[in-house]
Image: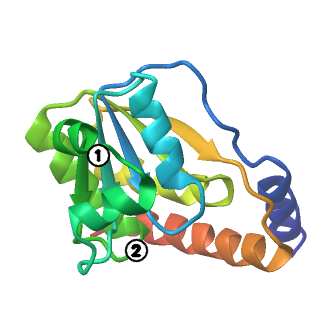
Amino acid sequence: MLVYAFGFLGFAVSLPKPLSGEPTDAVIVLTGGPGRIARGLEVVDLELAKEMFVSGVDPEVRPAEFAAEFDVSRRTMECCVKLGYLAVDTRSNAGEAAQWLKENEFSSVRLVTTDWHMARASSEFAETLPSDIRVVEDAVSSHPDLATLFLEYNKLLVAAVSQGLPS
């Protein structure tokens, strides 16, 4: 129990930070939290990535609606933003993103998600993506409550256990 408690404490006090200035071929944004899409668009606007893939978009959201909601120009939508509709959780985000990265032959990617979600998302991506794709973490800062941290830490532990089991 002590190991669990210290693990949780370490997780809670060492949330990752936003990344600045490092270019990648693409940026992957996982839906589900405030500021994630805005951060991905900022990365594209700063030309730190050529294209942005948004994983886990609700199937009812059309590109024009997305563009209007996030104030994305038509030019940027056409050249640089792709929407993924297949993912329903973090593991399927990784699978959907892996397919898109492979199809586009990207060798480096910036992973954008909320700070409290980054450890699990990064773990799922490391498990799914080919080893020759370099992933850099770009966390969106938040102020999670204790319940959010507790739930996410437990999900991280479950993911770690499931990844350690043979297929």
Quarter where residue 164 is shown: bottom left
Q: Earlier in the sequence, mark 1 or mark 2?
A: 2
Quarter where residue 48 is shown: top left
- Residue 8: x and y, percent? 81, 64
Q: Secondary structure at mark 1?
A: loop
Residue tagged by mark 1?
Answer: 129
Q: Nearer the viewer, residue 56 or 9?
A: 56
- Residue 31: x and y, percent? 44, 64
Q: Which mark is residue 96?
A: none
Q: Residue at x 37, y 46 (%)?
A: 28
Q: Residue furthest left?
A: 103
The kind of residue on which mark 1 rests is Leu
The kind of residue on which mark 2 rests is Asp
Could you tell me if residue 13 is visible in this image?
yes
How many marks overall? 2
Could you tell me which quadrant the N terminus lies in? bottom right
CA neighbours of label 2 inside 10 A, class few (<14), some (14 to 19), many (20+): some
Q: Residue at x 22, y 37 (%)?
A: 75
Kindly report the distance in space between the C-alpha atoms of the residues bearing marks 1 and 2.
16 Å
Quarter where residue 84 is shown: bottom left
Q: Is residue 79 above or below residue 160?
A: above
- Residue 123: x and y, percent? 48, 53
- Residue 93: x and y, percent? 34, 63
Residue tagged by mark 2?
Answer: 89
Q: Is residue 55 above or below residue 49?
A: below
Q: Are marks 1 and 2 in contact (CB under 8 Å)?
A: no
- Judged by depth in the image, the label closer to the viewer, 1 or 2, is 2
Q: Nearer the viewer, residue 114 or 62?
A: 62
